[in-house]
Every structure is written in C-alpha cells, then in structure tokens.
Image (cartoon, rainbow, N blue to C red):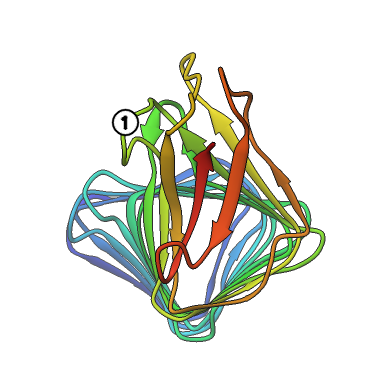
Amino acid sequence: MRVLGGTLRLSAGFTQTLGTAVVNHGILAVTGTFQMNGGTVSVSESGSEIQATGPFQQDGGSVVLDGGFGQLTAASVNLARGSLTLFGGILYAVGGVTIQPGATLYGGYGNIHGDVFNSGIFDMIQGSLLASLYITGNYTQAENATLRMGLNGRAAGANGQLTVSGNAYLAGTLTVEALNGTLPLQGDWFRLIHVGQFVGAFTTVLLPSVGSGHWLLAYNSPEGWLSITVI
C-alpha cells in the first residue's frame, strides 16, 4: 500500500502483515487499531502521518519514521516484537509508548509525546549519528531493560543525548559505546541524560575503555543531568 499525497481513510482498523506500506506526503487515517504483524511501514517527509484513533500494536516487522518528521499518532503505542525507528520522526501517544521484551525502539533523533515505559531495548545508536531524542513525559526503565547510547569523539557534546521533560524512573542497564575509534582520556566529560528528576538509578552501567584514568558516573551533575567523566 502506498499513500503518496492526500488522505486515505480506513474505517475498520488496519492490519499490516507482509510487504511494505509507504506514507509519503500523505496521511493514513485509521479508525480503530493499527495492527502491525510483519512487513515494513515507512512514514517519511514532513506532513506525512499515520493517525489511529485506537492503539498502535506492533507484534512484528519494522516501522520507520524519518525524512523530515514523519509522524505516528495513536491512542497508545505498544511494541511487543520487531522494531520502531525514529530517524527524524515524531510519536504522539497519549496513553504512552511501551517497549516490551523482544522489541527495540531505535532513537536516532526526534520527539516522543507521551510517557515511555521500557522493558526491552531503547537503542540510541544509529551508525555514527549522534542521537538526540526528546521525550515530553516520563521515562521508566524496568530491571530487564537496556538503554544504549554512544560517544563519537572526545569534544564536549560529541555524544548522544536523551532529554526527558518529566521524571526518569531508572533500573536495568545503561550501555555507553565508543564509536569510530573514540578513546576517551582523562578530563573528558559527557552529558548523557537530562531530566526533571531522577528516581532510582541504573542497576548496571557498562562504559567504554579509556586511554587514561577511569570513569566517574554522576547523577545531578550538573543539576538534572546524568554525566560521565574520565578522572
């Protein structure tokens, strides 16, 4: 299915099982549930949008929101299997975004409007891209979940950043990886996550090798930031 302009309205829900659905410079408006069982859905370019009055339920396949703020709007987004990639895209979900075990949310850059509940993998490494993602809401990470972030150079700001307007309720694993041969040295400082308030802490933190010194991880240093420093 291809929506290449205008609006296609489906009044009894929609199920994607095989093949590719493309929304480019158009709107796919679904009354009811958008059920994603397999295949691929691509929403690209500004003004392109999937609208669902009910939940977006993903049980397989891959969804990509890219190319200048492709947008997905649904009552809630539940990722049970497969992957959803924000590569310049926007998610609107009043009922929140849930990443279950077996699912991955790839956050290159973009915006999520709604609380995020991570029990799977939230991966903010997109090749060599320095991911920048903004969550309008709270971020909750379960004990079995992973947040993956990257460093791409030693300069201040040469790292992915996650901004949460609300609180971050933390557990599980934070993995930070050095990209393209980056080898942090003593004195290097990276701000990773900015939140309204930290509640709890990551249970496990995996940081890359350093050329000299060792890592110090600090919450609220400065206020509202989770930062890592080689000392």
Name which residue type carries label 1.
Answer: Ala
User: Residue at image x 49%, y 83%?
Assistant: 75
Please name the residue that numbered disc 1 is placed on: 155
Q: Position of residue 93 (x, y in %)?
A: 46, 78
Quadrant in the picture for residue 30:
bottom left
Q: Position of residue 20 (x, y in %)?
A: 48, 42
User: Residue at image x 58%, y 32%?
Assistant: 177
Q: Which residue of the protein is positioned furthest toward the top in this rendering?
A: 181
Closest to the observer, 159 or 93: 159
Q: Which residue of the protein is positioned furthest toward the right in this rendering?
A: 144
Quadrant in the picture for residue 51:
bottom left
- State how many labels appear: 1
Left or right of residue 27: residue 29: right
Q: Is residue 82 above or below residue 179?
A: below
Helix, strand or loop for disc 1: loop
Q: Position of residue 38 (x, y in %)?
A: 64, 48
Characterize the local packing of mark 1: few (<14), some (14-19) or many (20 or more) Cα atoms within 10 angstroms: few
Q: Is residue 226 above or below residue 52?
A: above
Left or right of residue 51: residue 171: right
Quadrant the C terminus occupies: top right
Left or right of residue 45: residue 12: right
Left or right of residue 176: residue 163: left
Q: Position of residue 14 (x, y in %)?
A: 53, 68
Q: Is residue 43 visible?
A: yes
Closest to the observer, 177 or 221: 221
